[in-house]
Image: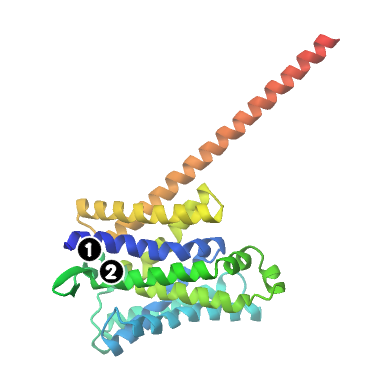
Amino acid sequence: MSYILGVVLLACTTALTCALPGVFVVLRKHSMIVDGISHAVLPGIIIGFAIVGDLDSPVLILGAAVTGLLVVLGNEWLTETGLLAGDAPQGLIFPSLFAVGILMVSMDFQHVHLDTHVALVGDMNLAAVIPLTVGGVNIGPEYLYVMLGLLLLNAGFIAVFSRALKITTFARQFAEILGIRTRLLNTAFMFLVSVTVVAAFNAVGAILVISLLVVPAATAQLISTRLSVMFALTAAIAIIGALAGFWIAYVLDTGTSAAMAVFYGVLFVAVAVAERTATRLRRNRHQDVKSEETSATLVRSASVR
């Protein structure tokens, strides 16, 4: 497999892996919590890398994901205590953890050589450098198969718990009446999101991963709120954005993940403007029809008289 094809496949796989759980993240209005997770996993990644020495190690991914889960659990605990309201708990927890991570990178923590820029925005091209060879044949980047494995895990989790996730998303109290353990399911789902954030760290960094998780699903929601359609649109937008981002990065000689994030943002704005315009046209057309009906009624009344 050629290097360029490997980067393209890695971009598409990473985008799709992040986008699938992003549908429920957007529907549950947990986007800012995911933003907190994406920042908070940084110290966990650095400590894990210092121990195992491999950014693709399953041990590192799971260990760093636990750090991200601390944001979720800490946010729930602080909210339940009533000490802080709104999104204040997130503003307390994740900047502190993120700052610790930045200090670790800056201080070359235990000889962990991670570039600050790469840690923040990732490097898709660098992530695709190490090939996986089977029988002397290069079958693509090693990292591609890490993300493929996680893509299957995310798709499998959503497929198995689809019904429970839908009920807890739209009717949490009803779900509790049905006996669904909502807190356990939410914790498991957010842990999966944490694992996804950590696994995507090589390619998109700790900052831009939020774009891959949230923007495709948010764009799809503008078009349709039907869950099956929303999943299909989210997957399509994720892949289109990955291909467009790679092409933009190739032409401009810039970072692929940053180009993907910019494309997703531009696409969201375009869809939002188109949706608002279409809504306004429908409203005007409806008003015109009502005006015509009213005029016709008045004419008929005048004729009767």
Amino acid on which the number 1 mark rests in the picture: Gly
Label 1: how many residues lie within 10 Å, few (<14), some (14-19) or many (20+)?
many
Q: CA distance from mark 1 to mark 2?
A: 8 Å
Label 1–label 2 contact, CB within 8 A:
yes
Residue that label 2 marks: 144
Placement of the C terminus among the 4 image quadrants: top right
Residue 23 x %, y %: 50, 61
- Furthest residue in direction left, as rendered: 136
Question: N-terminal of the two: label 1 or label 2?
Answer: 1
Residue that label 1 marks: 6
Is residue 258 left or right of 126 when viewed as pictured? right
Please report the residue visible at 20 percent of the width from the left and 50 percent of the height from the top.
251
Amino acid on which the number 2 mark rests in the picture: Leu
Label 2: how many residues lie within 10 Å, few (<14), some (14-19) or many (20+)?
many
Please report the residue visible at 42 percent of the width from the left and 72 percent of the height from the top.
153
Element marked by disc 2: helix
Residue 151 x %, y %: 39, 68
Is residue 131 left or right of 72 when viewed as pictured? left
